[in-house]
Amino acid sequence: MSGFNSAKISFLIVAVCTFVFTAGLTSAQQVQLPPTIAQSQGMHSIPVVSDDQLQRRLAVTANQERQIEIRRDTEKMAELTEQLKAYLDKAGQGIVSLDALKKAEQIEKLAKSVRSKMKQSL
């Protein structure tokens, strides 16, 4: 569940940054500079980012975030799987505890989360 919340937070941060950056570009395009400033020699060296380049950068950043989350979730899933396996080896044929069931549910949620994030990366 925490992976889901951090994914939401990461998405919201990227969305807000995109909105602020786009609003800044829009307002910067509407500003009229005096001719002496607009024609100064230093102005031609300012990099201009097109919407396509911005979208690409945002997509690359979002994909990198997803890859980090996939690795983190996969590591947590492996850790929980080892814990569950160790418990089941100790318990043998006896009754399965509530803790073991919770670990299995966490593993299932993480697996679904990883699968979903992997599909988004395509």
Image (cartoon, rainbow, N blue to C red):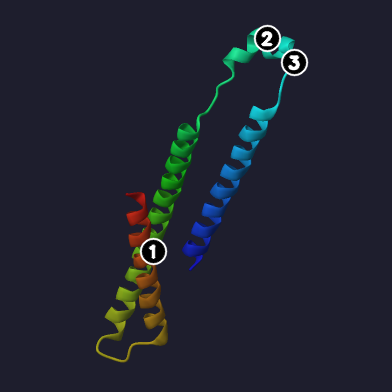
Give the residue at x 60% y 44%: 19
User: Foreground: 89 or 98?
Assistant: 98
Label 1, secondary structure: give it. helix
Foreground mark, 1 or 2, reads 2
Q: Which residue is mark 3?
A: 34
Vertical arrangement, residue 110 with respect to residue 27, above or below: below
Query: In this rendering, would 25 be left or right of 99?
Result: right
How far apart in space, not on screen, are marks 1 and 2 (Cα)? 53 Å
Q: Is residue 67 above or below residue 76?
A: above
Residue 7 is situated, as x and y percent measured from the top left of the image, at 49, 58
Amino acid found under the numbered disc labelled 1: Ser
Return the residue at label 1: 113
Where is residue 105? Give x, y as percent. Answer: 38, 77
Which residue is at 52% across, 53% downward?
Answer: 11
> Please, which residue is most extreme toward the top here?
41
Secondary element type, mark 3:
loop
Kind of residue at badge 3: Pro
Q: Residue at x 26, y 86 (%)?
A: 92
Q: What amino acid is found at the position of numbered circle 2 in the picture? A: Ser
Q: Residue furthest bottom?
A: 95
Q: CA distance from mark 3 to mark 1?
A: 54 Å
Within 10 Å of disc 2 (Cα), the crowding (few <14, some 14-19, many 20+) is few
Helix, strand or loop at mark 2: loop
Q: CA distance from mark 2 to mark 3?
A: 10 Å
In the image, taking residue 32 as reference, residue 49 lies left or right, namely left
Q: Quadrant of residue 39?
A: top right
Q: Nearer the viewer, mark 2 or mark 3?
A: 3
The earlier-in-sequence mark between 1 and 2 is 2
- Work out whether residue 27 or residue 110 is closer to the camera in this orientation and state it: 27
> Which numbered disc flags the more N-terminal residue, 2 or 3?
3
Q: Which mark is residue 40?
A: 2
